[in-house]
Image (spheres, rainbow, N blue to C red):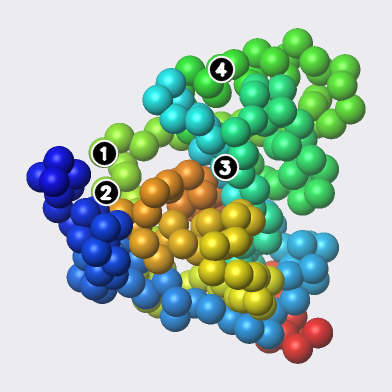
């Protein structure tokens, strides 16, 4: 009864299993972006420009998320290629970012601007001799949430517009056979997006938004292949 009084809608969903209606969801058009014939491996190895967003843990929340997207230069459609999350320490988070940088060489790494970001930068500067660390720390760029989060163009509502216009491609075949409660980053992200704003977590949603801000900030040249070249492989 205390939960019902504090958060009536969360109570209805969590205790009575009443699903969100589309008008309550932040991203009701997300499922329209599902694609079942896209080769994720081809996208990961491809030369499309990539952008990474990092959502960091805070004092009241453990959990970090790293989200990397590739962008088709000819259509500007965005495709997730690497998702990862975990309750990492500063050095572990830095190691994860280093691995992402080595795999994809993103144009920029957008990091939430909080005290933990400085801890990561400090750790990286103190370990510049470590393989991989010196290759990415200068790519870190601070980004903030605040009022931008609900901006109709740059914030989360802007993502919904992009989903509605199918400006994203979700490689559904990468995880569609996983069990309903699968804890992998792809499945957690899918549940976060479909159930936002009432999902238990939103770390990967925020990391996705930060990566998308990198795309908006830096752009790219219009060249390359189309998504049709990556299907049925």
Q: Which element carries disc 4, helix, strand or loop?
A: helix
**Foreground label between 4 and 3:** 3
Q: Mark 4 points at which residue?
A: 118
Q: Real-space Cα distance between discs 1 and 3? A: 21 Å
Locate residue 35, reporting x and y percent.
Answer: 59, 81
Residue visible at 36% across and 62% down in the picture? 195
Q: Name the residue under label 3.
A: 65
Question: Compared to 209, does 46 lie above or below?
Answer: below
Task: Please identify the quadrant where the C terminus is shown.
Answer: bottom right
> Tag 3 or tag 2, which sits nearer the N-term?
3
> Tag 3 or tag 1, which sits nearer the N-term?
3
Locate residue 72, reporting x and y percent.
Answer: 64, 69
Tell me if residue 20 can be seen: no
Residue visible at 32% across and 45% down in the picture? 149
Would you call the spot at circle 1 few (<14 residues within 10 Å), some (14-19), or many (20 or more)? few
Q: Residue 147 carries which label?
A: 1
Q: Do the residues labelled 2 and 1 touch (CB within 8 Å)?
A: yes
Q: Which mark is residue 124?
A: none
Question: Compared to 31, does 149 lie above or below?
Answer: above
In this rendered view, identify the residue nearer to me: 202 or 111: 202
> Tag 3 or tag 4, which sits nearer the N-term?
3
Residue visible at 60% across and 70% down in the picture? 179
Q: Which element carries disc 3, helix, strand or loop?
A: strand
């Amino acid at each position: 009864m205390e939960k019902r009084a504090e958060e009536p809608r969360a109570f209805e969903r969590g205790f009575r299993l009443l699903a969100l209606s589309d008008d309550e969801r932040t991203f009701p058009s997300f499922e329209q972006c599902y694609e079942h014939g896209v080769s994720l491996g081809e996208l990961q190895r491809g030369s499309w420009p990539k952008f990474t967003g990092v959502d960091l843990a805070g004092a009241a929340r453990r959990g970090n998320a790293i989200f990397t997207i590739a962008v088709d230069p000819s259509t500007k459609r965005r495709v997730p290629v690497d998702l990862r999350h975990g309750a990492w320490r500063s050095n572990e988070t830095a190691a994860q970012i280093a691995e992402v940088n080595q795999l994809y060489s993103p144009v920029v790494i957008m990091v939430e601007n909080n005290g933990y970001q400085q801890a990561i930068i400090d750790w990286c500067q103190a370990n510049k001799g470590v393989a991989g660390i010196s290759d990415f720390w200068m790519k870190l760029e601070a980004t903030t949430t605040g009022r931008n989060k609900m901006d109709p163009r740059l914030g989360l509502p802007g993502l919904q517009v992009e989903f509605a216009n199918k400006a994203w491609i979700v490689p559904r075949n990468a995880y569609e056979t996983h069990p309903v409660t699968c804890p992998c980053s792809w499945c957690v992200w899918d549940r976060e997006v479909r159930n936002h704003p009432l999902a238990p977590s939103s770390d990967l949603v925020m990391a996705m938004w930060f990566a998308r801000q990198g795309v908006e900030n830096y752009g790219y040249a219009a060249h390359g292949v189309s998504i049709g070249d990556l299907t049925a492989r």
